[in-house]
Image: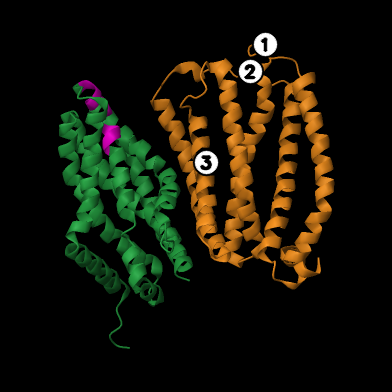
Chain colours: A orange, B green
Amino acid sequence: MFLWFHKFGSPPHFYRIAGKWIPWLSGLFLVLVTAGLFGGLIAAPPDYQQGDSYRIMFVHVPSAWMSMLVYVAMAVCGIIIMVWRMKLAEIVLISSAPIGASFTFLALVTGSLWGKPMWGTYWVWDARLTSELILLFLYLGIIGLHNAIEDKRVAARAVAILAIVGAVNVPIIHFSVEWWNTLHQGPTVTKFDKPSIYWSMLLPLLLMALSFQVYYVLALFQQCRAELLRRERNSKWVEEL
Amino acid sequence: MNNRLSLSQAFVFLLRRDLLVALRNRAEYAMPILFFVLVITLFPLAIGPVPELLSRIAPGIVWVAALLAAMLSLDSIFRSDFDDGSLEQILLSPHPVAVLVLAKVCAHWLVTGLPLLIAAPLLGQMLGMPQQALPTLLLTILIATPVLSLIGAIGVALTVGLRKGGIILSLLVLPLYVPVLIFAASAVDNAAAGFDVSAQLTMLLAFLFLSLSLSPWATAAALRMSAS
């Protein structure tokens, strides 16, 4: 187990393994996303209240889930960096940040596009929207801090601390935003009865979620390989490539 | 070594030193409070001198201004120590860095957070905040501004080595301030409307203890990173 861990952490090894995985992951992603989109956009029946516009949920919900999952992954990397100073974790952490920010942005955009026909406005200060927006700021802060520090190994440690601090804070922020929202009972357009979801909608949703996860790993591997080459450009194994 | 300081002595020593430095640089440390007053003055000018409107949004204005003033003053926690090298001495000392960091944050709060206690009721009055909200306003400032200093210290420690840390610092710190802002402003808001505020104050106290126990460690780790 530890040997595997150690081996996986070595940059050249990871570079090779990730390179082998990328075509397989791309294939898997294509299959899943096609099935999910077919199920979501064609096979699933229109909603009795929302008509067809609910279908954006098949992109929106998975990306919102991913925006949180990626942050958790970054915090785990942060702990690994602080404890073991593992080089690979540094690269995974910083490569995850733009991907996570993109998922968060996608969730926000699709959410407000859905909100226009449903709520009559692109943006409401709803609890989830607001905490998602703050999450986006946290991602941007991590990216900004990493860019600002020139020595990338130092930058990785700074970002690791920030990711851990953020991970402690994210539940607090989420909870307080929710509490704030129930207090400031604003326009009640956000209230609508959530029909319990039908399996013909649930299945494509889960497929889409799975495909987004595969896509994350895929994008992560590609980003990591590029980052690895950039950092280790002076080392022997890169020259041998 | 016989003349080694004990931990509590080192704590008090550092606290006293920082307060002394602040006393000698009075003008510099008066800036945040001036900024606080200025920001609040801008709101009536921008919104219009409508008393009902101003008294309605006074809690929010005061707290947003307090947040910005706290952020503006954060840089002074570690900046000068980083520049003249005393930060490295602190890191090299035999005592746990987290405790020494706590001393510095305490000093910073005494210098920048506490004066808000004097200015805030005055500005609350000027904005027409209801009388019964003033004790709550003071209480929230007393409880919540240390949280701002403690969380902010992490951000400063991360960015102190950078030449242009200011913008990044606000990007790092402001999202983390959101819970404090929500609960503090809502407490004052509720008090102005005559409701019970114990729930908000309890939450703010929880934030205070949480940040008091966790933030010094994160700050110490970040300082070690910045100084390396």
* Helix, strand or loop at mark 2: loop
For image coordinates 19% across by 35% down, the residue present is B124
For image coordinates 27% across by 33% down, the residue present is B59
Q: Disc 2 or 3, which lies upstream in sequence?
A: 3
Vertical order, A24 against A33 (above or below): below
Q: Is residue B53 magenta?
A: yes
Q: Residues within 10 Å of mark 1 (few under 14, many from 20)?
A: few
Q: Nearer the viewer, mark 1 or mark 2?
A: 1
Q: Which residue is mark 2?
A: A195
Q: Position of residue A11 (x, y in %)?
A: 73, 65
For image coordinates 45% across by 34% down, the residue present is A177
Verify CB contact (< 8 Å) between mark 1 and mark 2: yes
Q: Nearer the viewer, mark 1 or mark 3?
A: 3
* Helix, strand or loop at mark 3: helix
Amino acid beneath label 1: Tyr
Query: In this view of the protein, which residue sits in the foreground, B190 or B202?
Result: B190
Q: Position of residue B120 (x, y in %)?
A: 20, 41
Badge number at residue A135: 3
| Segment tinted magenta in the rendering | B52-62
For image coordinates 19% across by 67% down, the residue present is B20
- Image quarter of the N terminus of chain A: bottom right
